[in-house]
Image (cartoon, grey):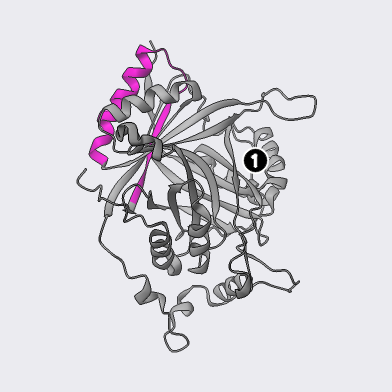
Amino acid sequence: MKSFNPHSHHSLVTAILPRQSAARVLDEVLNSGAAYAMTLNARGTLVHDHWYQALLPAISPEQEILHFIVPDSDVDHLMEQIVMVGKLRLFGAGSIYAIPCEDLICSDDYPLWTPGQYRFKSVSFDIRFRRDLTALIHITDRGGAEPIARAAIEAGAQGATITYIRGYGLRDRLGLLRITKHHDKELITVVIEPYDLDAVFQAMARTGRVDKPGRGLIYQLPISKGLTNLASVFQAKKHSASIQQMVRAIDELHGSIDWRANQLLVYDPRAAEFAMSSRGLSRNLKLFNIVSQRKDTELLLNLLLDHGVSGASVSNWRFDEPDSEHTQGGIRMNREFGCISLILPPHHIPDLRRVVHETALENDMHEICSFSHSVPISKAFVSMTKG
């Protein structure tokens, strides 16, 4: 009989890379002993640097997202190798961050990494990962991501990353009116420094109109360590450095970002403009993730909705393994997995996990794992704190 086993001290490591460097990084990581990687296509966001170009569409460079569920003992080695191979210390080269996995439980046939199997060891390589970063995740209707990403950049964020997902919940309860709502959604991710967090959060929430019904939600994910070097502004003229590079250099000279909030130097109008509204605000929730083979995703999702889940999103992931077959053109042939994600109060998770495990046993499902992340703050039309 299949069993589900808990695993402690693991983290989800996420790398956001330009398409041209992602394949090289993935090959290096898999050749160093990584059990697998979950990958998906994405696009970046570059806005034009002149005010008169504000109405022009944003430039969307191709990106790829790599996800790894990694034992904490291998997190530093993995992140350092990705930084080195992907040259993430260079401006515009990408982002990488780790988020602790809480209550990681996997079926006994899920190919979880074995601690110590990762062979890459750093050699006198000094990388200073930030430990005060936050990821902001915004889910909106398909086609609505660009204004939200632009608002985030104008409020101080680096380049936003956009992926396609499927959303479930409200649409599935509208009866015949469900034809007015589509499953297709877009997920916007930005990695934020502490000084910009409140301003960017409120700018995205306001632009996405999350205080209106059916308009999505935004939430925070604390990052245990990370590094971000994504560009956000397209400059037609060549300059020796961008404003983001200059700000980062001043941060390093000061040893902190406190100088940015010096009221004797500058008045920050965002303090009033982005004042926190309590409407639809929820605190101390969890992001509950269920990873399964893609063919099993729909059955699991429908059962979760039947058990009272108010909403869920599904991402399609490619399952890259070291022994994956390749086409004659060198393209890796991968299996397909899905990740169901739900925002909900912590006390709901045990019952939903039980439903997942029972369904997996009854339907002979293979390779399933679940884990959660802390969500300090989220915002939607209705508060989920008491849900």
Q: Which corner quadrant of the image does residue 303 belong to?
A: top left
Instruction: Pick the quarter of the image with the N terminus.
Output: top left
Question: Where is residue 185 drawn, in percent x and y?
Answer: 47, 43
230 lies above or below 71: below
Circle 1 sits in a helix, a strand or a loop, which is it?
loop
Residue at 39% x, 14% y is: 2
Q: Residue furthest top?
A: 1
Residue at 29% x, 24% y is: 354
Callout 1: 10 Å neighbours few (<14), some, many (20+)? some
The residue lying toward the viewer, choosing from 2 and 58, is 58
Is residue 65 located in the magenta-colored stretch of the structure?
A: no
The residue lying toward the viewer, choosing from 92 and 151, is 151
In the rendered image, is residue 152 in sight?
A: yes
Which residue was labeled with disc 1?
120
258 lies above or below 211: below
Q: Residue furthest right?
A: 328
Question: Where is residue 87 drawn, in percent x and y?
Answer: 69, 54
Q: Which corner quadrant of the image does residue 305 belong to?
A: top left
Task: Tell me the kind of residue under disc 1.
Answer: Phe
The residue lying toward the viewer, choosing from 65 and 57, is 57
Instruction: Pick the quarter of the image with the C terminus.
Output: top left
Q: Which residues are magenta?
A: 346-375
Question: Where is residue 90 drawn, in percent x and y?
Answer: 68, 60
The residue lying toward the viewer, choosing from 90 and 18, is 18
Is residue 358 located in the magenta-colored stretch of the structure?
A: yes
Question: Where is residue 240 drawn, in percent x and y?
Answer: 73, 74
Asked whether, in this view, residue 295 is left or right of residue 16, the answer is: left
Asked whether, in this view, residue 75 is left or right of residue 324, the answer is: left
In the rendered image, is residue 8 in sight?
A: no
